[in-house]
Image (cartoon, coloured by chain):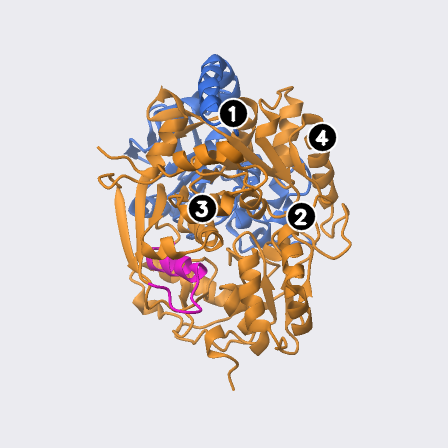
Amino acid sequence: MKPFETFSGIVAPLIRMNIDTDAIIPSREMKSVSKQGLADGLFSDWRYESVESRKENKDFILNQSPFNQATILLSGRNFGCGSSREHAVWALSEWGIKVIIAPSFGSIFYSNCIKNGLLPITLDENKIDLLEGFVSIDPLKNQLSVDLASRIISFGTETIEDFPIGTKDRESLINGLDEIEQTLDKISLVNEFETSHKAKNPWL
Amino acid sequence: MGLTLFEKVWNQHSICNLGDGNELLYIDRIFLHERTGSIALKSLEERNLAIRNPLQVFATIDHIVDTFPGRDDETLMPSGSDFIKSLRKSAKQSGINFFDLDNPDQGIVHVVSPEQGIALPGMTYICPDSHTCSLGALGTLAWGVGSTECEHALATNTLIKKKPQLMQINIDGKLPSGVTSKDIVLHLISEFGSNGAKGYAVEFTGSTITDLEIESRLTLCNMAVEFGAVTSLIAPDEKTFSYLENKKFAPKGDDFLTAVKEWGELKSDPEAKFDKIINLNCSNLTPYVTWGTSPHQAVPIDEIIPLSEQLNEHGERKSMNRALEYMDLSEGEAIKGKTIDAAFIGSCTNSRISDLRAAAQVLKNKKVAKGVKAICVPGSSQVKKQAEEEGLDKIFISAGFEWRESGCSMCFFAGGESFGHNERVISTTNRNFENRQGKATRTHLASPETVAASAINGKISQASTGIES
């Protein structure tokens, strides 16, 4: 996983509640047994006039300049609810999204973000309104800057400080660590636990 | 201080504390399907990582396989067979338990799991599928994960997890005749929102829950994820124990007796503390139907779609307007009596034998209304076999339903079979999202009884009131 670095980027406000992972990437866009090649299917029901022709729907924000260069998504409550498909995160990342800011997230989606270097930031609706207002004045110029190490979002001369993220999640994102390798380093603890656990539950 | 059921199971599986509230949890069993399991297994192979305990891992084919009679690996979904073949290859190489298409125990992952005794009380259990929370109905600590976490569990038998907050939902009252656990859960979500249990693991308690049979509990817990919950649990009881006795992967003989003794301890202590408590009484509950594109947009079948002025929040009103436009409905309109194009009975929510029996009871000696496409997809090959032994297939077929092979089928559109553009479908599934069952398809979620009654009338109808004039 690539380490998450401080950056500034264009913000696309896609303010809708309950944007589910079926909407982020419809099942029929998950065409191969692979974690790649999914950006083309991102939001395909909304992004294309017809899914077959792939003709862009000009009304959809990610098809409009400068939002087609966005790296930060602002959204509504319960973003990423629904299916557990990690393809939703792979598609967003591959398309270029690095940060999603929403009042709340689907819990599996949130975990999937952390595992793939995508930063989910939970902010109150009024703060999201504030950011939306700032961006809408001049979306190209009014970018957000996200500093994960200090948990600060800067916009213009203002800042939002101490945005919530777990210490371990933050470290995982900053260091791009592989959790399987980390756990395999502790496998003797697992072996020890398993021996007594299976003695108690011999049917396992 | 007393402990909750959740805490008891969690503590029994905590290997060590990793700081910042994270614990390394032992995962007892893992279940995979071809849609997401194929990717997790392939990814492990590419990294040269072995499955730590193949016998604690199970896999089935359900998500994109066709459900037409005589089906094989080839699917209507372009490239669907790649997923089936990839899972089969990985499963055979790794030696995990595999329910292939020709296996008499094949079926939808969350139907097969309780049916075969794979999910058991007090176990930790994961599956790369959001409806894994269904298994909480047996007292299993089960939840859905993404592919990366699944790979972690396959390689190490562990996951790194933070303990969620705990919510008790206490439900009392005798359910009126014809009202089901599907109606309870739609009622709950409509009252408290699709975000209502965000960050919580939910334990369902109360006399209504005790009265529910295991399959009804599975339906209730299935939709906890639509309530935003991390997962849900119900304390195992005598019904659970007798349900699990003699299941293929459940303990046998003396082991079963030992297990039942331990499982009997799996309940929240009287003095256990929950972070939040919700109390509901369901003695006057009526059947529910969704009108929108999120499961919380639901009303009792006799009531009208709410007026937007009743919603006190701008975001909710905006979401409602968008949903009504998609569904081609208006605020204040009655939901009962809306003409339907199709009826679907199936999915991990409502495709078990009791669901098919309930629907068949409504369909007996009746015919599906002209022009309504009606499909029944049993949840597993075992459910299908049992239904056929009871003659339920004949009732469905003579009413005008298609009788299918088991699988997830048209619960979602994966590029193969789907309902049509702008078609209105009443469905026993769990998600009424935009385009979920087909491009521009309009889904109404309801119980098997309501779906069966609506199929007969050709419009959204309540079973207990019979055919309307």
* Badge number at residue B64: 2
Q: Which marked residue is nearer to the observer: mark 2 or mark 4?
A: 4
Look at 56% across and 78% down and name the residue there: B457
Other-residue count near label 2 (Cα within 10 Å), few / some / many at <14 / 14–19 / ≥20: many
Residue B177 part of the magenta segment? yes
Three-letter amino acid code at the position of disc 2 = Ile
Mark 4 sits on what residue?
B92
Q: Do circles 1 and 2 both sit on a common chain?
A: yes
**Mark toward the viewer: 1 or 2:** 1
Residue assigned mark 1: B157
Q: What segment carries the magenta color?
A: B174-193
Name the amino acid type tagged 3.
Thr
Residue type highlighted by circle 4: Lys
Crowding near the residue tagged with mark 4, few <14, some 14–19, many ≥20 C-alpha atoms within 10 Å: few
Ranked by sequence position, the earlier of labels 1 and 3 is: 1
Residue B389 relative to residue B172: left or right? right
Q: How far apart are marks 2 and 4 (CA)?
A: 20 Å
Q: Nearer the viewer, residue A22 or B451?
A: B451
Residue A84 lies in the magenta-colored region = no
Image height check: is B414 above or below B14? below
As shown in the figure, which amino acid type bears the numbered disc 1?
Answer: Asn
- Near mark 3 (Cα within 10 A), the count class, few <14, some 14-19 or many ≥20, is many
Residue B81 in the image, given as x and y percentages of width and height: 74, 43
Q: Which chain carries label 4?
A: B
> What's the magenta bit mostly, secondary-structure-wise?
helix
Considering depth in this image, is B305 or B326 the residue closer to the camera? B305
Q: Assign a secondary structure to mark 4.
A: helix
Chain ID of residue with mark 1:
B
Of the numbered discs 3 and 2, the one sitting upstream in the chain is: 2
- For disc 3, the marked residue is B240
Give the Cα separation between the discs numbered 1 and 3.
26 Å
